[in-house]
Image (tube, rainbow, N blue to C red):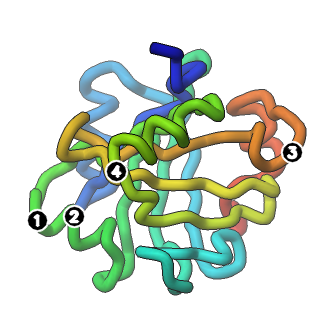
Amino acid sequence: MEQSFERVGGFVILTPDMEKSLETFKSYGIIGPWREFYTDAENVQQVVKAGKAAEGIEARICMCDYGEITIELFEPRDPESSFYQDLQAISRPFIHHVIMRTKPHFYEVAEEMGVEEHMSAYFPRIDERGRWFATSDELGFDIYAWDPHMDGPRKKYPDDYIVTGAYDTDK
């Protein structure tokens, strides 16, 4: 079988309490530096959920880079969002999705396996569309398909994301 992924870009951990999660990570020696961001309708656009247009993603995010891997703590702020509802169902921090640099073959595999793309969003500051695939039942986490081959020139992660301001840093 052909590889579907080039590499892991990061882990996204949903948390009900950002401050407590930051303290916990730091107590384990994952001290940062942590960068804090907020998402809103300006920097997360053209959201599609279950094939229908939807509102943006509202969240507080703290990111820490370890080499080429990013740990992202994600505190959802919208009670109507699937992120928030997933967190309420589990009620503790957990890995929600893994950012994977995909190869075109991944989409063939997803189609063959009947894996749905349950959400996508456009991030204007990095000019890229993220795509979430419902793989948590089989893999234990959803796949966030980070696929620059679909969106334009290949970018170096995380530098092109941090430098261009993937999230709103003015808050």
Tag 1 residue:
89
Q: Position of residue 68 (x, y in %)?
A: 60, 20
Q: Earlier in the sequence, mark 3 or mark 4?
A: 4
Amino acid on which disc 1 is placed: Ala
Question: As shown in the figure, which amino acid type bears the numbered disc 2?
Answer: Asp
Residue drawn at (60%, 66%) of the image = 121
Task: Report the mark closest to the observer, 2 or 4.
Answer: 4
Q: Whole-Å distance between the Cαs marked 4 and 1?
A: 24 Å
User: Which residue is disc 3 drawn over?
Assistant: 152
The reply to whether discs 1 and 2 touch (Cβ–Cβ < 8 Å) is yes
Left or right of 134 on screen, residue 162: right
Mark 4 = which residue? 114
Label 4 residue SS: loop
- Looking at the image, is mark 2 or mark 4 earlier in the sequence? 2
- Between circles 4 and 1, the one closer to the viewer is 4
Using the rendered view, name the quadrant where residue 16 is placed: bottom left
Q: What is the x, y in percent for residue 35? A: 58, 45
In the image: residue 159, left or right of residue 61: right
Element at badge 1? helix
Which of discs 3 and 4 lies nearer the camera? The answer is 4
